[in-house]
Amino acid sequence: MSATPTLVARAGTFFHRYANPGRFLKLGARLQPWLTWPALLFTLAGLGWGLFFSPADWQQGDSVRIMYVHVPAAMLASAGYAGLAVCAVLSLVWRHPLADLAAVEIGPVGACITALCLATGSLWGKPMWGTWWVWDARLTSVLVLFFLYLGHIALIRAFDDPQRGYRAAAILALAGAVDLPIIKFSVQWWNTLHQPDSITLTGAPTMSSSMLWPLALSTLGFSLGFAAIVLARTRAAVMESRIRSLLSSPRRRGSNAAGDAA
Amino acid sequence: MTHLPYILASYGLAAVIALTLSVGAAVRLKKARTRLAALERPTDRTTGATPSL
């Protein structure tokens, strides 16, 4: 047997360093303001710029301003689910306790941001397409993502034994990740009413810089805000877990019984 | 046709969701921190009661 640790084992050691609740809480407390305040600043700057100072589109008119909310929400809906899938791998492969807690907290935030993406898409679709909804490949695959989030939230809380809920939800998160490339490439694979991506990793953006900058700012702000909210919720979940274990410890139960007897 | 109601509804919805999630997280974190601090406070060994100030 080789004495050299495998990549999987080394990765496991790295991730387990932050399985210690005390270490995670210390790191989280230090990180929280660096996520929260820039998130607020960039979101307000991006949305303010988009709403008041960016130009109207020659075709869409002022409705283009909905894009500064819709596009970051759409990106985060997929990114949040990718985060769930990463937590699922960490949970199933390394049994990382914080990955399970983080998955519980990512689910509702991801579901809310996906609902925002769907709602703002409809609010843009009504004046532009003349309808609130079409069963287009992009819209339908995002709706499926929303249901996957809801399924994850329900499944993780469906068992009396939380560990069983974590396992089942992790498997759902991994299986559901197949929807992410479908969302991404739906506008290329099918003939959709939804327009193709204006920003890609390989090509130059097909958007004026006067619209690109506020969009970039609001996307950065939304992303930091998502991370800040998930971190705050995960920190609270770790503390609540510690509270539960303290309350159920035999020493505390004994001292409570002594207090009651006195 | 004005698009203003659609734009305002989009931004309003974003604000409501952001506020609900962030205030909810902040309140939950504060409550958990206070409760944990109270539980981890050293207790009186003879009675198990929290020492009064």
Image: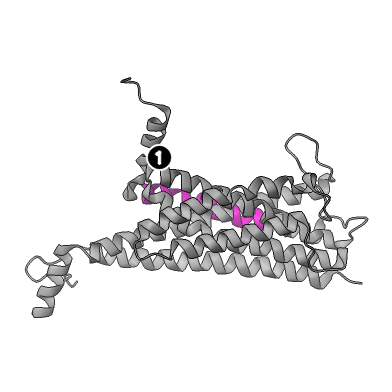
Q: Quadrant of the N terminus of chain A?
A: top left
* Residue A222 percent location from the top left of the image: 63, 55
Q: Residue at x 76, y 70 (%)?
A: B8
User: Which amino acid is tagged 1?
Assistant: Phe
In the picture provided, is A261 more to the left or to the right than B27? left
In the orientation shown, which residue stands out farthest toward the left? Answer: B46
SS under mark 1:
helix
Is A30 located above or below residue A249 in the figure? Answer: above
Q: Residue at x 55, y 65 (%)?
A: B21
Q: Residue at x 81, y 47 (%)?
A: A196
Q: Quadrant of the C terminus of chain A?
A: bottom left
Could you say which quadrant of the image residue B22 lies in? bottom right
Q: Residue at x 83, y 70 (%)?
A: B4
Could you say which quadrant of the image residue A43 lies in? bottom right
* Residue A14 percent location from the top left of the image: 39, 36
**From where the camera sits, is residue A73 visible?**
yes
Q: Is residue A201 magenta?
A: no
> Which residue is denoted by mark 1 in the rendering?
A15
Query: What span is colored magenta in the figure?
Result: A24-44
* Residue B19 percent location from the top left of the image: 58, 68
* Mark 1, other Cα within 10 Å: few <14 / some 14–19 / many ≥20: some
Is A180 located above or below residue A252 in the figure? Answer: above
Magenta span: chief secondary structure: helix
Q: Chain of mark 1?
A: A
